Amino acid sequence: MPSLSLGELIIILIAVIVFIRPEELPKLMRRLGRAYAYAQRSLTKFKTYSQDTMDELTSLEMKPEPNTSEDEEDESERPVPRDDDAD
């Protein structure tokens, strides 16, 4: 995020006063404040949503696999039939 020095802020303030009538400044500042608050709320909601999603995915990865009954054989333990055994 860029940082502004005091001199730059003063120049910006003078430019705003010159180009925007002083009567309109309070309305402009209110609009800017509301826009900033809306952006902050949206960012907070996004952070919360993304953190909740990451937590949910992490909990799904950490769940143990369901146990299979002992009398069922695992697919990887079954012998593979070969055509050479037919002789």
Image (spheres, helix red, strand yellow):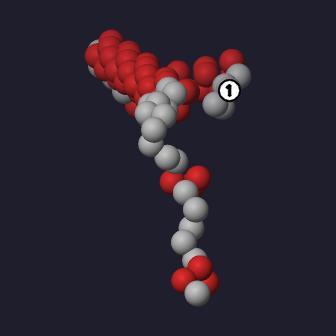
Quarter of the image where the C terminus is located? bottom right
Residue 69 visible in rendering:
yes
Task: List x then y, in percent, for residue 24.
Answer: 30, 19
Task: List x then y, in percent, for residue 69.
Answer: 43, 33
Question: Residue, x 54% and y 83% (percent of image)?
Answer: 86
Q: Nearer the viewer, residue 58 or 43?
A: 58
Image position of 19 (left or right of 64):
left
Query: Callout 1: 10 Å neighbours few (<14), some, many (20+)?
Result: few
Residue that mark 1 sits on: 3
> Relative to 86, does residue 50 appear above or below in the rendering?
above
Question: Residue, x 34% and y 20% (percent of image)?
Answer: 38
Residue type at the position of mark 1: Ser
> Relative to 48, does residue 83 appear above or below in the rendering?
below
Image position of 5 (left or right of 48):
right
Q: Quadrant of residue 80?
A: bottom right
Q: Single out the residue that lies furthest toward the front.
A: 87
Quarter of the image where the N terminus is located? top right
Label 1: element kind: loop
Question: Residue, x 59% and y 79% (percent of image)?
Answer: 85
